[in-house]
Image: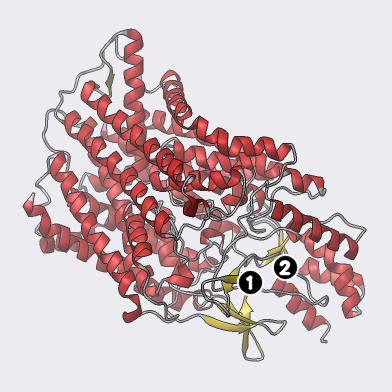
Amino acid sequence: MLREIRPAILVLLALTLITGVAYPLAMTGVAGAIFPKQAQGSLIERDGKVIGSALIGQEFKSDKYFHGRLSATLAPDPADSSKTVAAPYNAANSSGSNLGPTSKALADRLKEDVKKLKAENPSSPVPVDLVTTSASGLDPDISPDAALFQVPRVAKARNMPEARVRDLVAENTQGRLLGLLGEPRVNVLSLNLALDAAAPQ
Amino acid sequence: MTAIGWFQILLYCVVVVALVQPLGWYMTRVFSGERTFLSPVLRPVEAAIYWIGGVDERREQHWLTYTVAMLLFHVGGFLIIYGLMRLQAALPFNPAGQSAVAEDLSFNTAISFLTNTNWQNYGGESTLSYLVQMLGLTHQNFLSAATGVALALALIRGFSRASVRTVGNFWVDVTRCTLYVLLPICVVYSLFLVWQGMPQTLGGYVDATTLEGAKQTIALGPVASQVAIKMLGTNGGGFFNANAAHPFENPTALSNFVQMVSIFAIGAALTNVFGRMVGNQRQGWAILAVMGVLFIAGVAVTYWAEANGTTMMQALSLTGGNMEGKEVRFGIPASSLFAVITTAASCGAVNAMHDSFTALGGMIPLINMQLGEVIVGGVGAGLYGMLLFVILSIFVAGLMVGRTPEYVGKKIEAREVKMAMLAILVLPLMYLGWTAVAVVFPPAVASMANAGPHGFTEVLYAYTSSTGNNGSAFAGLTGNTFFYNLTLASAMFVGRFFMIVPAMAIAGSLAGKKSIPPSAGTFPTTGGLFVGLVVGVILIIGGLTFFPALALGPIVEQLAMTAGTLF
């Protein structure tokens, strides 16, 4: 038994250096050389400033922009660091709402949001992804239905014809991979960038 | 439910099954010490490790020595993770300036990664430095997975050998699994993940100014290298708090599909390794069939429940299923499938928040774990868990016909059955016992995020997941408290080692037995009758153990939900 102590220390250290140092550092070097953009987080720049990541959702509140999904992320309370406050799309602290199927808080929130959206666009059914929080709180996408639902509001706020806005939604809609995997979706940030490019404010 | 959803599920099963034979063939060669196409590169590294460690690769170990070597290996692993977490503020690769992690949280996390659980009481991007993620967590992701495979190999050798005292050499098994199986796959896999959009950088967090002018700090890091082994080794501990739901940790539908395949790949292929080593691949396929039956049943229930949505959503005419806590790019089918896979295997990564699943949709992950994670299961752990159930089933079948039970040429006797029962019974003792304590201890009750039966399910899920070394959570529960950090760690420890030691004792006792050729009275273990029997034994033992607890949680919640009751 005693002769197992030496390998317990040295084999462990050797494997630790290989898997914990050599492997991640080598992958960082290789990935940075082959896929530099993705390796750095798929950042998007406009006028030389980083405005976000193509993969990370951000909060949109203005009527002039398409809105993403609800986000339940939190941040430390500036007044009392032992508590947290709501901070939607906090990309340094991902999380979901974790509200269950019989949660009164969830039921109240759904009712309120559905009422608001119905007032905004009474002619279409409310898409479920517009009133539910995403798992990460950073979902960059909405469903095509959820984008089309917002077209009248955005067109009005920007003074654009609805058909033009609808075209932009169609251009920014990604289908399933090979028609099979995943779900059709619209990246909200890229749609809003296209919107800004089409109709500068 | 949609046709395209079911098609994705079917495609998944086809890909996993197609990988079983090639991967099983390759692993069998590796673990028998034969040359592979990677030997020219890796053999010198392997030899160097043995030389440094003073390991004689031809010297095999008695089961007890093998177990002691494994335990000593864990002591060192614990010290590395715990030390790194406590000292991270003073160490390099900490661009976000994370401070030292508290004692209880460090203890919980060290035990958690050591036992292949990877329970997240920490939030990756808000707690850990890049150094801890790489040197502490990535390395232990490899080694805990390799340990699981090594133990499964020892048990397989118990069946495949006759009249010997040894079951293999732990150091050789761990080194070979790490170098020849896990590492090469992870190198290719992590590059694929970066291509799909996963970050792999040592640079600090980036401050962006959003279109509406707000400041958004974007957490980055060496994500891909860790996620590759987190999935392949069924570890499941996320780089980020939201785990595989985070767009950086699972950017596309394709990355999601490949991640799901990689969770099952090694575990499923080990059934083939078993078949090859006992001399009949059909023995392996029969075991995989048992797993497959239970898996498909689970997927069907969860997908159906999630696609239906909750009563409150139906009342508001919201269609499209229960999207609370799910991501648009995965949708209902890929989220439901992922949840069943991650709990069937002991992975524990999540691409949707299980806490927000419907009552029945969330009950299946819970049941998967309570069945002992034998549906493919953790790498290695799933196979030795399943073999324990096989031993019991063979014993039951033997009782029915009044003959001494035997399996792949080995007589199953009192010692094996006792050890198998010990391993199987210790799990419910942990998760039911600690749940009972937690729900009457006020500070523990205060951690629940949801009221009513759902809060109870959060606690039951936490102890089930930690005992089963899964690591997924009903994440609303505030687990980072002194009480939960310690009790969850104890559940993880007992769940891992009180299963391993009896399994190793069985390996040792089987290896010493003579091999008997099959006779007319031997119960055939490659057919449908055997598969049905094992499925039955798993469901009956499981059902008797945890049905009462489920009745207080998800079952009563389902009834409350249909009645429109809210909490």
| In the image: residue B130, left or right of residue B279 | right
Residue drawn at x 35%, y 27% is B390
Q: Is residue B18 left or right of residue B398?
A: right
Please name the residue that numbered disc 1 is placed on: A89
Q: Earlier in the sequence, mark 1 or mark 2?
A: 2
Q: How is the image coloured?
A: secondary structure
Residue type at tag 1: Tyr
Of all residues, the one furthest to the bottom in this rendering is A48
Report helix, strand or loop for mark 1: loop
Closer-to-camera residue (B358/B196) = B358
Instruction: Tell me residue B128's x, y (percent).
Output: 41, 71
Tell me what residue is drawn at x 22 percent, y 57 percent: B75
Label 2 Cα crowd, 10 Å radius (few <14 / some 14-19 / many 20+): many
Q: Mark 2 points at which residue?
A: A68
Q: Is residue B295 above or below residue B514?
A: below
B544 up-or-down from B564: above or below = above
Q: Distance between the residues labelled 1 and 2?
A: 10 Å
In this rendering, the count of numbered labels is: 2
Amino acid carrying mark 2 in the image: Gly
Mark 1 vs mark 2: in front:
1
**Of B413 and B530, which appears nearest the observer?**
B413
Q: Which is more toward the observer, B79 or B376?
A: B79
Q: What element carries label 2?
A: loop
Residue under the point 24% across and 26% down? B416
Q: Are marks 1 and 2 in contact (CB under 8 Å)?
A: yes
Image spot of residue B212 (x, y percent): 72, 82
* Badge 1 and badge 2 in a common chain: yes
- Position of B121 with respect to B506 (left or right) is right
Quarter of the picture holding the N terminus of chain B? top right
What residue is rendered at 61% in x and 71% in y?
A: A85
